[in-house]
Amino acid sequence: MSVMGCLRAGGLVLAAISITAGVTTVEAQQIDYPVDTVRIVVPANPGGGTDTDARLFAEYLGKYTGAKVAVVNQFAGGGVVAAQTVASGKPDGSELLLYHTSVHVANLTGTWPFGHEDFTALATIAQFDDVIVARVDAPYDTLSGLIKYAKDHPGEVTFGSQLGGTTEIKGMAIAVASEDTLRVVDAGSESDRTTALLGEQVDAIPMGVNNAQQYVEAGQLKVLAVLNETANPFAPEWPTASSQGVDLSFPLVFAVYGPPDLDQAAIVAIDQVIARMKEDPDAEKDFMRAKQVLSLRDSKEIGPFLEKEHDFVSSFIE
């Protein structure tokens, strides 16, 4: 079954818990992968953005190599079990980990004993953007306006985030830009944060682009900024933080890791898969249908990117 066949219209939910991709065309056989069966371990439950990204990558890994690729969801222990599975796995390419920017937060806050340096970093695949939203009656229309308002009203503006996650880092970055006049508070998951914002318990929150579009169209919320230096393709009319003079670009980027000392043949093969995906017009179309933006980096490009990402997160965690 095609991964895209499992995608529900208008959403990200995939029906299957795991897939196998065994296309055996001449094109698929051009990339020689060192094993015939691959498990992509995901520290998240089925149905979310991380799971979606894993299944799409599994589809293309199988398509180009002919390997049978299964996605395995292991959220036990907050994802620690998944990280342990791959960190201690065989270095032959048969087990890979797919996770996102939270790997830095989890490691730096002590939630995970593993950081990105404890794996072989292979590639980045795609990314999600968060936007900063406020109620439509807020006395500011932009992120720069929110920061100015917070400076003019120290201690009065609250930013709802989820402590211990990437949204807390985003809140802390905005707090620093406001010279600590804005307060970051724990408001829970995105659904909880939204309820708190609409209930006037907090003044601004980070939210995924897809959800934000619904509330903007309903006339309940307004977007202050996209937290990326480039416009989001699903809402190109929304301003970026950078365009307002706020140096904050922090998308949620999904990356693929292997065990330490991964077989060089597997690294070369994944590099070839990434190169093929960059040239395959269907890849961008499939990810766009799943409301994801391709963000492809190979094993040579991912190292500097992860270091920069890690340094940004660590600058806000004591």
Image (cartoon, helix red, strand yellow):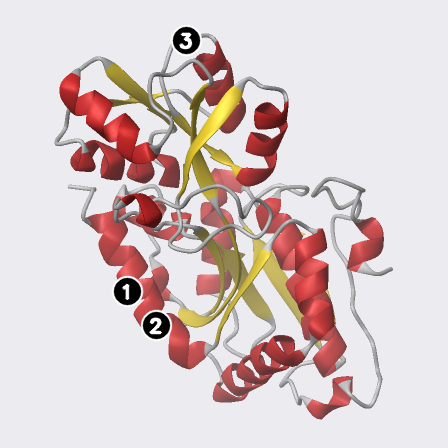
Task: Name the mark nearer the viewer: 1 or 3.
Answer: 3
Q: Residue at x 40, y 50 (%)?
A: 228
Quadrant for the C terminus in the image: top left
* Residue 75 % position (x, y): 55, 42
Q: Is 44 or 77 nearer to us in this picture?
A: 44
Q: Amino acid at mark 3?
A: Glu
Element type at marker 1?
Answer: helix
Q: Is residue 255 above or below residue 28?
A: above
Q: Which mark is residue 7?
A: none
Question: Dividing the image into 4 quarters, which one contains the N terminus?
Answer: bottom right
Q: Decide which of 127, 22 is in the foreground and name it.
A: 127
Q: Which residue is mark 1?
A: 307
At label 1, the amino acid type is: Glu
Task: List the residue tagged with mark 3.
Answer: 200
* Distance in Å between CA atoms under marks 1 and 2: 6 Å
Indicate which label's residue lies in the foreground, 3 or 2. 3
